[in-house]
Amino acid sequence: MSQDRWFERLAASVGSDTHESAPATLKSKVYSQLLREMAADGPLLDLKTTKNTGGYLCVFENLLTVLPSGSDIAATNPCRICHARVLGERVDHAPIFWPGCPYAEFHGH
C-alpha cells in the first residue's frame, strides 16, 4: 500500500468532528513566549493606541491607560507580571474571568 493511500485511509477513519484543541496551559505558554519575543525586539504598541484603534484590553491594561504615566509604562506588557498569566500557564481550567484577558479566553471563560 502506498503512503498516500495509507494517509488517506487514516484521515478518513479519524473523521472531521474529532479534532482536539491544544490545552489552554500550552496556549498560555505560547502566548507568553510570543509576547516576550515581541518585547525583546522593542517596545510594544502603546496601550492607549491599542484601545483607540479598537483593541480590547483587560482590566489592568485599561487601568494603565487612565493613569498619568510615561510612555515607558504604557508600552509594557502587564501580562508578564499578572497573576492570570501564572494561573493560565500552570492550572487547567484556571478561574480567570476578566473580560479582555487572553488567558481567560484560552481557558474558555
Image (cartoon, helix red, strand yellow):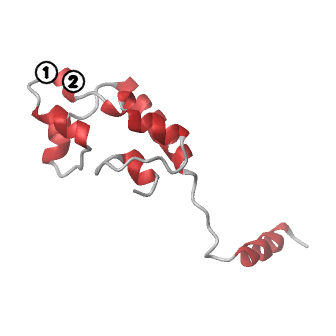
- Tally of numbered discs: 2
What residue sits 78% from the left and 69% below the top? 7
Quarter of the figure with the C terminus: bottom left
Q: Nearer the viewer, residue 7 or 27?
A: 27
Is residue 19 left or right of 71 when viewed as pictured? right
Q: Quadrant of residue 4?
A: bottom right
Given the image, on which type of amino acid does mark 1 rest?
Answer: Gly
What residue sits 36% from the left and 32% below the top? 82
Q: Secondary structure at mark 1?
A: loop
Is residue 70 left or right of 1 when viewed as pictured? left
Between the residue at mark 2 and the residue at mark 1, the CA separation in whole angstroms equals 6 Å
Q: Tell me: residue 61, above or below residue 96.
A: above
Q: Secondary structure at mark 2?
A: helix
Q: Tell me: residue 56, above or below residue 36.
A: below
Does the residue at mark 2 contact the one at mark 1 (Cβ under 8 Å)? yes
Question: Where's residue 23, x and y in %?
Answer: 57, 51
Question: Where's residue 57, x and y in %?
Answer: 24, 45
What residue sits 76% from the left and 74% below the top? 8
Residue occupying the far right of the picture: 1
Question: Where's residue 71, x and y in %?
Answer: 16, 24
Q: Residues within 10 Å of mark 1 (few under 14, many from 20)?
A: few
What numbered label is drawn on residue 83? none
Given the image, on which type of amino acid does mark 2 rest?
Answer: Ile
Residue position marked by numbered label 2 in the rendering: 73
Question: Where's residue 43, x and y in %?
Answer: 28, 26
Residue position marked by numbered label 1 in the rendering: 70
Q: Tell me: residue 5, above or below residue 23.
A: below
Residue 34 seen in this snapshot? no
